[in-house]
Amino acid sequence: MNNSDYKILLVDDEEDILEFLGYNLKKEGFKVYTASNGVEAIKVAKKEFPSVIILDVMMPNMDGIETCREIRETPELKDVMIAFLTARNEDYSQIAGFEVGADDYINKPIKPRVLVSRIKALLRRRVAGDIAVEEKIEMGGIKIDRERYLIVKDGDEVTLPKKEFELLALLASKPGKVFTREVILERVWGGEVIVGDRTIDVHIRKLREKLGEEYIKTVKGIGYKFEF
């Protein structure tokens, strides 16, 4: 992945945040554009066609939720990845963000290297699109071999029951993507006996016990995502 091939649009009404994040992303080789409100962001996006938009929620003139909604209704911007960057931790704001088409949700403050990692994960998803899940996935010290139903973490093999393996493979297929409980149930359990949220929670807990707490993140009211 060549960072210089990608345009990043930062949208925030705090100038110091734009300068700080913009400086660090430029150091990584990204082409960076900025906007201080939603109206300006839409204009820049339509002109530059960024690969990723990092969008603050609380802004004057047009907030991040409405900005995201309008971007998603613009055909030429349908492939752009959008991540909300906000200090707000209320569940309803995350739910509202995903409902209007956000791809990720990042809480302030965030370290530059973490932001770069999240942006790269979004770019991988953008490139992959709807391509089928790869047979072998390797990231963050974990290797997943779907063909052999094998997990290797930091050089050690980890044995997982079939459903735990399928759940992990699904989440890891698109790092940073939030999988809703409904999608998880459909993709992992399919038409089998009806299971509920409690079943998913138990499997997630078991995966965390075996792999560590850092890989699978809970997005309250939505579902789960894999990070590394």
Image (cartoon, grey):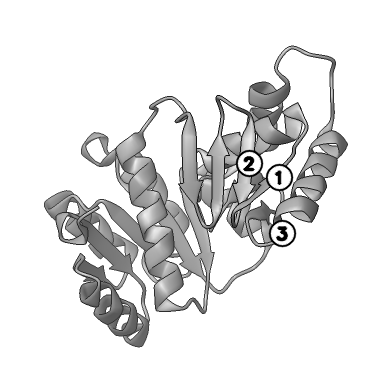
Give x and y (percent) for residue 132.
43, 24
Q: Is residue 45 visible?
A: yes
Q: Nearer the viewer, mark 1 or mark 3?
A: 1
- Residue situated in front as seen by the camera: 135 or 18: 135
Q: Are marks 1 and 3 in contact (CB under 8 Å)?
A: no
Q: What residue is disc 2 on?
A: 151
Query: Marks 1 and 2, Cα distance to the nearest angstrom?
Result: 5 Å
Residue at figure coordinates x 35%, y 46% from the top left: 124
Residue wearing tag 1: 158
CB under 8 Å between callouts 3 and 2? no
Observer-nearest residue: 125 or 10?
125
Residue 108 location in percent, x, y?
52, 75
Identify the mark nearer the N-term, 3 or 2: 2
Alpha-carbon neighbours of circle 2 within 10 Å: few (<14), some, or many (≥20)?
many
**Disc number placed over residue 170 in the picture, else none:** none
Q: Residue at x 71, y 59 (%)?
A: 212
* The image quarter in which residue 25 lies: bottom left
- The answer to which quarter of the image holds residue 72 is top left
Tell me which numbered mark, 1 or 2, is placed earlier along the sequence.
2
Q: Residues within 10 Å of mark 3 (few under 14, many from 20)?
A: few
Whole-angstrom CA distance, mark 1 to mark 3, is 12 Å
- Amino acid at pointer 1: Val
Mark 3 lies on residue: 212
Instruction: Judge left or right: residue 192 versus residue 140.
Output: right
Q: In terms of secondary structure, where does tag 1 sit?
A: strand
Residue 57 seen in render: no
